[in-house]
Image (cartoon, grey):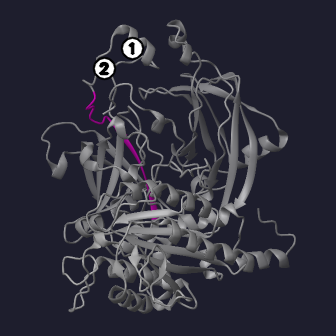
Amino acid sequence: MGGCFSDVRGGKDAVGGALPRPTEPNAKNDGAHNDAIEFFYRAHGAYPLFTQLELSFSASKLLDLDVTSKCNLTATSLLSRLKKSLVFFQSDPMVVVYLKKNDGKLEELGRTEVILNNLNPVWIQKVSVAYQFEMVQNLIFRVYDVDTQYHNVPVKTLNLRDQEFLGEGSCILSEIVTKQNRSLTLTLKGKNGLGGLRNFGTLTVHAEETIASRSAVEIKFRCAHLDNKDLFSKSVSLPDSSLQDPFLRISRTVETGGSIPICKTEVVDNNLNPTWKPLCLSMQQFGSKDTPLVIECFDFNSNGNHILIGKLQKSVADLEKLFKEKSGVNFFIPSSRAGHEKVLKGQLFVDQFCEKEQFSFVDYISSGFELNFMVAVDFTGSNGDPRKPESLHYIDPYGRLNSYQQAITEVGQVIQFYDADKSFPAWGFGGRTANGTVSHCFNLNGNASESEVVGVEGIMAAYANALRNVALSGPTLFGQVVNRAAEIAARSLSSNNNKYYVLLIITDGILTDLQETKDALVRASNLPLSILIVGVGNADFKQMEILDADNGQRLESSTGRIATRDIVQFVPMRDVQTGGQISVVQGLLEELPGQFLSYMRSMDIKPPTINAAAQASPALEIL
């Protein structure tokens, strides 16, 4: 679905060069492990016997579903709107990986990025999978052509029913692992093996074991005097594209020959002397400081036919030397004659090089950091009369949990494990309390001066008691609850008590105070706080998706302030209940370790035991 002159911003974004996340929730239904959940099970004696692998992908001769997608434009509009000269566009492929369960159901493990207009793509985004040698792990790989209207949308939010199917392949994970080069090429077929003699192309899957390492480097690249490859653009005098649009792609060489892409920069438009945003590369990506890296500079074309400007090969150690010496290195163009290369005037410079130690979620938790749980429950009238079975607040006499109880129990059981005293603030909002006034942040236990209850059982008891003493009212307002949680998180900063707060909001309604809530979230974004929102019932939750900011757009307050980081994760209960592939706790906690780490890194907070070791050994420098 390369379409015609679509939004290509998604294709110009950087891939793989950001701070590594503790988990990789590429998929909407992520089957990869989660540090928070895994640590919980390990502490209870459940030690998984697996090896964590990363799968990388390339394809050849994919179906071209866009071969007839010409634009109905005049010659004049073609010249004015076509940036890089081709009328025909090719498929925009993405790989989705599934694990086939024993019952035949598919569990999604992850998704690659979308590559624009390319029938022979090499994807950068990896997919994590836990390899268990004693189990037969059936993997399904499906390739989709992503519609152009979704090119600037995070892949994990894409509805696959809206995309064109290009083919699928399957194998047993051990088939890949037992190959000498850990690579397996699959012939793609139609869905469920159908498709007859039609050629769907091939997909190559390569597996590598994940290296547990804290080491990373942050590098900022710049180029000077690049050759201009946009000769056609110049010849037709297109003023907005007279220069090339360069980006860098970095690949790591492998022992068996060839290379695997590990990241690419963003595209810098119309510039022969570009400077890119810093890249952060982990040791998992580059291997060691002496591993050769292939650095290629391309001129971006929206039709997918990116033109090689030049390439070079340097290790991370070499790049560090360039930085220290403040010198550049020339690109070259390979020649068809063996051993002959054309050296170019264009040069690569390293303007910033910084070695970092990146600590994991488990590093912090195991050294004494706590997650403090808070909960807020929606008491607005749209939930329905709690005495009637159709109410979202109906408490079943036979013990079946309603959606509110289910969310409290599933999330609380995991989070309370990380909280030493297990005393949790619990509030309600949108209810008419005993004094006859509607409150948008009242203590669930009925105590005017103390909001804390003990354990998940205490929350459940306070919730049930509140349903008997608080009348449902409205409207739905989050602002006061978010502000109350933020006040608690802010007070903790002065006591240096190694706490991070998690507020669970359970709601059925449409927000009345969307802007006030956004303002509160922006203010709270520099505090040790994450907010998990569960939507129950069948309301329109588009506002919650705005708060979630999964589209890459950080929240903006009414005064123009941008959120320091994303602190919200939203999951509609109906999707969990009907999909059946993930639990509430998986859906809510998939981003929590990443949000936790983003705060720790932004504030330069290290695990206490690491700090103590550094102070005891002054010669040890931890950047």
Position in image of residue 96 (x %, y %): 33, 52
Q: Secondary structure at mark 2?
A: loop
Give the number of callouts: 2
At a point 25% along the width and 65% down the height, the residue shown is 579
The residue at which mark 1 appears reads as: 78
Is residue 308 highlighted in magenta?
no
- Residue 372 in the figure: left or right of residue 144: right
Position in image of residue 300 (x %, y %): 51, 28
Residue type of the residue flagged with mark 1: Leu
Q: Which numbered disc flags the more N-terminal residue, 1 or 2?
A: 2
Q: Is residue 132 visible?
A: no
At a point 42% along the width and 29% down the height, the residue shown is 304
- Residue 145 in the figure: left or right of residue 239: left
Front-lying residue, 503 or 341: 503
Q: Which residues are magenta?
A: 53-66
Is residue 54 highlighted in magenta?
yes
At a point 58% along the width and 89% down the height, the residue shown is 420
Residue type of the residue flagged with mark 2: Cys
Quadrant containing the N terminus is top left
Front-lying residue, 102 or 475: 475
Is there a contact, CB below 8 Å, between mark 1 and mark 2?
A: yes
Q: Secondary structure at mark 1?
A: helix
The residue at which mark 2 appears reads as: 71
